Amino acid sequence: SESRYSAQNVKEVPAVYDADAPVLNGFEVLNRFFDHVFATNPSVFAFGEDLGRIGDVNQGFAGLQEKYGEGRIFDTGIREATIVGQGIGMAMRGLRPIAEIQYLDYLLYGLQPLSDDVATLHYRTRGGQKCPLIIRTRGHRLEGIWHSGSPIGMILNSIRGMYLCVPRNMTQAAGMYNTLLQSDEPGIVIECLNGYRLKEKLPANLGNFTVPMGVPEIIREGTDITVVSYGSTLRVIQEAIDTYLDPVGISCEVVDVRTLLPFDLNHIILDSLKKTSRIVFIDEDVPGGASAYMFQQVMELQGGYKWLDAAPRTLSAQPHRPAYATDGDYFSKPNAEDIAEVIREI
C-alpha cells in the first residue's frame, strides 16, 4: 500500500517512562492500554471466546465489558472462522475491530478467510477496498499440546498482505496495536502466552507510543555473535547468555525482529552481522519454519553470507507439537542449554 495511512508510514514514537513509573504485570499493562483505546476511539470493537464477561483468559480485558458495554466488547462461540468473518465485515464498513483468536494454535481454523480474503483484498480491488482488521492472539511457550504452538511458518506463508507482529512483551504489543490503529491495513499481533504475569514498567505515553513495522531492535549489544529471534524465545536467550556465555567471555548481540512481515526493511541485522561475523537464528517454530525464513532473508536477500567467519545456524523447536507438562516444554523447544551449546559451537 502506498497510502499515507499505511502502517509503514506511521511515525515511530518511543515509549516514555516517568521516574516513578509503576511496575505492573504484563496483563495489567494491556488492560490499561485497552481501557485507553476504548475511551478515546469509539470505532474500536473487540470480541472473541471469553473476551467479554471474564475479560479474556489472561485478563487483558478484565472489567472493560462492564465499563464500555456488551455492544463493543463481547463474547463469541467457539468458531474461529466466523470470528474472522465478523471482523472482515466490520472493518470493511468503517469500524476498527479487534478479533481475538484465543490461542495461536487455533488460528488454523480462521486461516482460510485471512489468507483468501483479508490478505488479498487491497490487491484484488486495485486499491479500491481495505480491511483494517486486527487479529489479537497469544502463543509460543507454555505447557501443553494445543495451547503452546508456534506455527509461524504456516502463518508467514499464508497471509502475505497482512502485518505479522511478534512482540516480546505486552508493552511492545501495545505499541504495535497503536501503530495498526493509526493505519488502514490488517495485521496479526501474537502476544507471549507466558508473559502476562511478568513485570513491566508502565509507559507514561501508553496510548500514543508506536512500534515501527519492519524495524528490528537491538536489545543487547555484543561483538562476537548476532543472535536473531522474537517473542518468548528472547527471554530464554537472555538466560543462556547470563548463565553460560557471559561467564566465559562470549559477547552476544541480541536482535528482536519485532515484526516478521515486513522483515528488517533497513537491514539492521546485516549491520550487526558486519560487526560480529557470526549469526544464529533462534525461534520455537518447527525446523524449516520461521527460522529458515529469517535465515533466507538475511543470508540471501540482504547478502549476509559475504560477512561470515563461521557457518550460519538456525535453532528451532523439535519437529512435533509440544509434549505434555514442564519436561515436555523444556525438551520440545529450545532451552538455555541448547542455545548456549549452539553459540559455543559457532
Image (spheres, grey):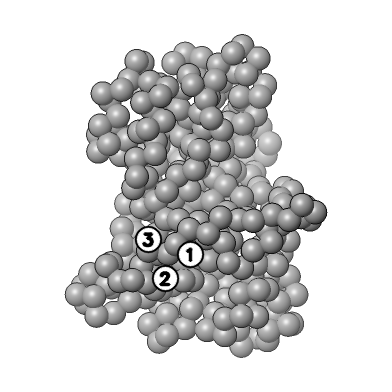
Q: Do the residues under discs 3 and 2 have CB atoms within 8 angstroms?
A: no
Q: Is residue 170 left or right of residue 150?
A: right
Q: Tell me how far mark 3 sits from mark 2, CA to CA.
A: 8 Å
For badge 2, the amino acid type reads Ser
- Identified by mark 3, the residue type is Gln
| Crowd band around label 1 with a 10 angstrom C-alpha radius: few (<14), some (14–19), many (20+) | many
Give how far across and how far down residue 197 sits, in percent: 74, 51
Which residue is label 3 attached to? 8
When asked about the image quadrant of residue 85, the answer is: bottom left
Please tell me which residue is depicted at 57% across the width and 76% down the height of the picture.
46
Compute the Cα span from label 1 to label 2. Answer: 7 Å
- Left/right of residue 70 with respect to residue 4 in the rendered view: right
SS at circle 2 = loop
Q: Residue at x 63, y 44 (%)?
A: 142
Of callouts 3 and 2, which one flags the residue occurring earlier in the amino acid sequence?
3
Residue 327 percent location from the top left of the image: 66, 32
**Side of 97 where 205 appears, left or right:** right
**In this view of the protein, which residue sits in the foreground, 152 or 233?**
233
Which residue has dot 1 on it?
Answer: 179
Q: Which residue is mark 2?
A: 183
- Asked if 241 appears above or below 148 in the picture, the reply is above
- The quarter of the image holding the C terminus is top left
Looking at the picture, which amino acid does disc 1 mark? Thr
Label 3 element class: helix
